[in-house]
Every structure is written in structure tokens, then in C-alpha cells.
Image (tube, grey):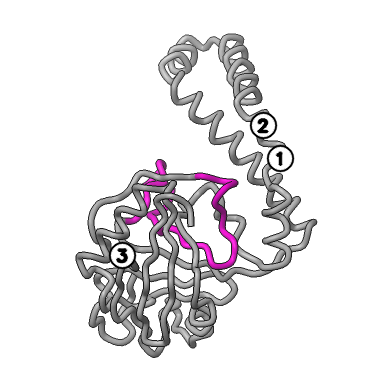
Amino acid sequence: MNPGDVKVLLHTSLGDITLLLYGDTPRHRDNFIKRVEAGDYDGVLFHRVISDFMIQTGDPQSKNAPKGKMLGAGDAGTEIEAEFLFPKHYHHRGAIAAARQGDAVNPEKKSSGSQFYIVTGKKFSPAQLDQMEHRAIMQHKQDVFNRLASEHRDSIMSLRRNRDAAGLQALQEQLAQETERLTAADTTYYTPEIREAYINQGGTPHLDGSYTVYGRVLEGMDIVDKIEKAETDANDRPLEDIKIISAEVVK
């Protein structure tokens, strides 16, 4: 454990899972502890379970929810500012990360106040990782360019109103050059450690940089695997309820 790390024990209906919350993602760590101490996780279901992907819980509306009810829209508390620490924290098997609303309504990628998921994932080949790395780098460049364009919106609108095609082209080239400068370090997206983990253990690398990873499973991945294999309905909810009976901070 590193300074600031905290252990949390989840007593589930299929067995115990011990989590380690990272001290260097303090907003998420403190919020999780607050939710545990308030009893928000006591009785919630694992409402979304997808094989070779992840198990998700933390929806307060799942407590005592009738069979077949679609879940996942509930939340407790307020959204949390993202704490992306990639490549230090990434979506390896056993990683804990915050669920959130989609980019269309949540461009800042703020985290849910209570919902989280535990990664099970699958293994990837070196070639697959190369492709994902390339896409991630291109997406980051696009995000940076869009941010710069947003910052220059008034200038862009003025050039458009004046039908100044040459001015627009010059500004676009300027922003493209600035984007390349700001993203120059992105050529080594996956470290050797990350590659080894995704190849030999598995995970969900396509989520890196988009969802905050703030912990990992210390003990109980066998329980996570049991939950992952549960039979589910069309909305990925287990047919037989699997719940967190109680949660406690381990002193």
C-alpha cells in the first residue's frame, strides 16, 4: 500500500471482495469512503454484468428492485471531477473505475457519485494493442484540436461571417501545429508493463483515459469471476439478484 491508500471490504451474496482505493485519486477515494460510511452500498445489486468486460454496481435504485426492472440511471451524491492518471492507473483485470454519463451530456467525463465497476476484461494480442494505441492517440489529438477550436470560436465565427477562407485556413493550420506540439509525447501510449498486463492478464484498454480508475481488487477476484458468469437478461441484469450485503472500511 502507498500513503493514502485505503482498503474496503465488500460482503456480497456470493462472497467477500477486498478493494484497495488509491491515495493519489483522493476525490474518488474520499467519496467512496463517504458512500460506505453512509450505508449507500448496503443492499445494492450488481445490476450490469457483461462477460469478458466488467461487473457494475452502486445504483441506489437497485435496492429491493423488482425482478426485471431496468437499472443503472440512479446515483447518490454529486458527480466527481475526473482524476485520470493514465498510464499509472489503467483498466487491467481487477481495476476499479467510476461509471459515468456519456460524452454527449458529460463532455468533462465527470464520474458518477456512487456507481462503479470492476474490470474483468479479456486478453489482447500485440497487434490489437497497436491498433488501439493508434486510435487512442488520434482521438486525443482530435480532442485537443477541438478544445483549441472552442477557445478560438469567436475568431472562427468572425472569419466565417466575413467569408475569409484564407484566414480560416491559416487558423486551422495554426491550431493543427499547436495540437501536434501539445500531443508530441503521446507516441508511447502503452508502457511495456501495460502491454504485458493486457496481453497476459487482460482488461478493457479502450476505456483508458475516458473513465477514472481509482483502485483495484486485492482479494476476491474469484468472487468477481462468479458474478461475471451470472446469467443475465437483455439489459445485462443478472436473473438472480447478486448484491452487496454490506461494505466497511478496513482499518
Q: Residue 185 carries which label?
A: 2
Q: Which mark is residue 188?
A: 1
User: In the depicted view, which residue is nearer to us: 231 or 159?
Assistant: 231
Q: Position of residue 235 (x, y in %)?
A: 42, 76
Whether tag 2 and tag 1 are in contact, CB under 8 A, the answer is yes
Above-or-below relation of 236 to 107: below
Residue at the bottom extreme? 240
Q: Distance between the residues labelled 2 and 3?
A: 37 Å
Whether tag 2 and tag 3 are in contact, CB under 8 A, the answer is no
Q: Position of residue 113 (x, y in %)?
A: 30, 56
Residue receiving disc 3:
73
Whether tag 1 and tag 3 are in contact, CB under 8 A, the answer is no
Query: Which is in the foreground here, disc 1 or disc 3?
Result: 1
Where is the C terminus found, in terms of image quarters? bottom left
The reply to whether residue 57 is in sight is yes
Mark 1 packing: few (<14 Cα in 10 Å), some, or many (20+)? few
Q: What count of labels does the image hold?
A: 3
Above-or-below relation of 98 to 87: below
